[in-house]
Amino acid sequence: MSKPISRLRRVATASIAIGVATVVLAGCSSASSNTGSNGKTSDVELVFGTYQGPISDALDEAYFDDYADETGVKITQVPADYARYIQTLESGKPDWNSLEADAYDLLNWSEADYIAKLDSDIPRADLLPEEIKDYSVSGYGQSFLVAYRESAFDSAPEDWADFWDVDKFPGKRGFPSYYINTAEAALMADGVAKDELYPLDLDRAFAKLDELKPNITVYESYAALAQGFQAGSVDIALIPSGRAAALAKEDPDIKLVWNQNIFSWAAYTITADAPNADAMQDVARFMADPKRQAVFAEGSGYAPVSKEAYQYISEETLEYLPGTEERLALAAIVDVEALRDQNTEYYERYTAWLAE
């Protein structure tokens, strides 16, 4: 029996109000006949909700363009919209085939029977949490961390306590409008050990966030945060590692702090009851290829979900990549089970905190 996820709807609907990208493209529709390089013709179109930007380009390069060329199946990316996705799941008439989702969302949706298991012959991602392996189409690991402009400070910040230290490191802090990993950063700044964060002490976290609030500049999206950093509007920021890596590659003055990086996993769903479910299983099989995952890592700056993929990744990319043994040893790793139980309260409190 399916379990209700009305609490997830509340979270997702609220997310629209603080800058999560809203879909501008209609749902899944049949493509005109597409012909692949092998002569196969298909009327199938698959729709993926993704976070766009560098991830979108990397998905096309590593997976979608080649798959379309080989099979004739068209894969369309639209801006990820959790509220819309959940509403269609609850209606029983989903029209997107997949959504880019955090591990704790995958766990909730799998238990609610809203997403489908991978076929038994599809290799499971050996680096993903055990609870979501059967429901994850490829995916990636990402870290949230401190990034800073080296020329702006007399010394280098080393951790989240330094991020909070506005006397030693003066200036505005770039901050996301989305809640992910903000409480974890605050707790580590307040002295909580990286392996003792969960369950989150939200009262303590928001008291610490209050201390920093006069010194933050909030950006509506991670793309806007990266642009503000690039433009010099802020010299230090809480930012996803992929965005930070892209900035650092272009500008050697921008440095990344891997100590206390906050690491988590995301993956792509197979929407149950959406059109063309068989085709989605085939795409999942295609995306399980470690060499293709390495291409994705090279293009996106995010970690692959297959151990084997690491042997195909260049040293230049590994320099900025989360999920390596060295980076994980420094990381606060998100507890999927604990966070999903606190997710609604966490999100609602952050939304209210921003509005105060």
Image (cartoon, rainbow, N blue to C red):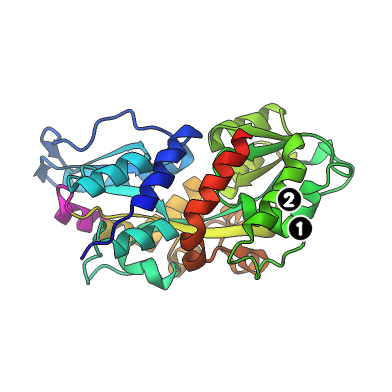
Q: Magenta segment, which residues?
A: 273-283
Residue 84 lies in quadrant: top left
For residue 186, above or below residue 33: below
The residue shown at (21%, 58%) is 281
Mark 1 surroundings within 10 Å by alpha-carbon count, few (fewer than 14), some (14 through 19), many (20 or more): some
Residue type of the residue flagged with mark 2: Lys
- Using the image, tell me which numbered label, if any, was put on residue 243: none
Q: Quadrant of the N terminus?
A: bottom left
Name the residue at 49% across, 46% down: 300
Residue 45 lies in the magenta stretch: no
Q: Is residue 254 above or below residue 291?
A: above
Which residue is under mark 1?
Answer: 190
Distance Cα–Cα, label 2 vs label 1: 7 Å
Classed neighbour count for the residue bearing mark 2: other residues with Cα under 10 Å, few (<14), some (14–19), many (≥20)? some
In depth, the one of 319 and 162 nearer the eye is 162
Task: Locate residue 278, reporting x and y percent.
Answer: 15, 56
On the rendered structure, is 188 left or right of 115?
Answer: right
Residue 176 horizontal/vertical position (percent): 60, 39
Pick the front one: 181 or 320: 181
**SS for callout 1:** loop
Q: Quadrant of residue 104?
A: bottom left
Q: Main secondary structure of the magenta part?
A: helix
Relative to the observer, which residue lies in front, 42 or 195? Answer: 195
Q: Which mark is residue 208?
A: 2
Instruction: Give the structural element (helix, strand or loop) at label 2.
Output: helix
Residue 100 in view (yes/no): no
Mark with earlier residue (2, 1): 1
Q: Amino acid at mark 1?
A: Asp
The reply to whether the C-beta atoms of the residues labelled 2 and 1 are less than 8 Å apart is yes
Q: Where is residue 240? Give x, y as percent.
A: 58, 47
